[in-house]
Amino acid sequence: MMQEIQQGRGYKHESGVDCLKLHLTHLGADNIKERRAGIKEIGMKFSGIDVIEGQVVII
């Protein structure tokens, strides 16, 4: 993740910390539900975002 940030693909979070956004919508809803259910659950639990519809901030 640090390499991505160092290469300019990160952004500054409102708290001032360097972050990434996890974007999975291109995988499709069925794929996420069937093969990445754990990631979907973590997104909902910690950020309230369904990764089928949006991006999760990774700090």
Image (cartoon, grey):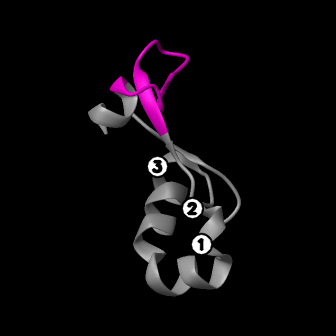
- In primary-sequence order, the first of circles 2 and 3 is 2
Q: Quadrant of residue 18?
A: top left
Q: Nearer the viewer, mark 3 or mark 1?
A: 1
* CB contact under 8 Å: marks 1 and 2: yes
Q: Amino acid at mark 1?
A: Leu
SS for dot 2? loop
Q: Where is the C terminus found, in terms of image quarters? A: top left
Q: Hey, which quadrant is residue 28 in on the image?
A: bottom right
Q: Is residue 40 above or below residue 1?
A: below
What is the C-alpha distance between the residues marked 2 and 3?
A: 16 Å
Residue at 44%, 65% in the rendered image? 39
Q: Which residue is mark 1?
A: 27
Q: Give the spatial CA distance, label 3 vs label 1.
A: 21 Å
33, above or below 26, in the image = below
| Stretch in magenta | 6-20
Quickly name the residue at label 2: 24
Q: Position of residue 14 (x, y in %)?
A: 55, 17
Q: Residues within 10 Å of mark 2 (few under 14, many from 20)?
A: many
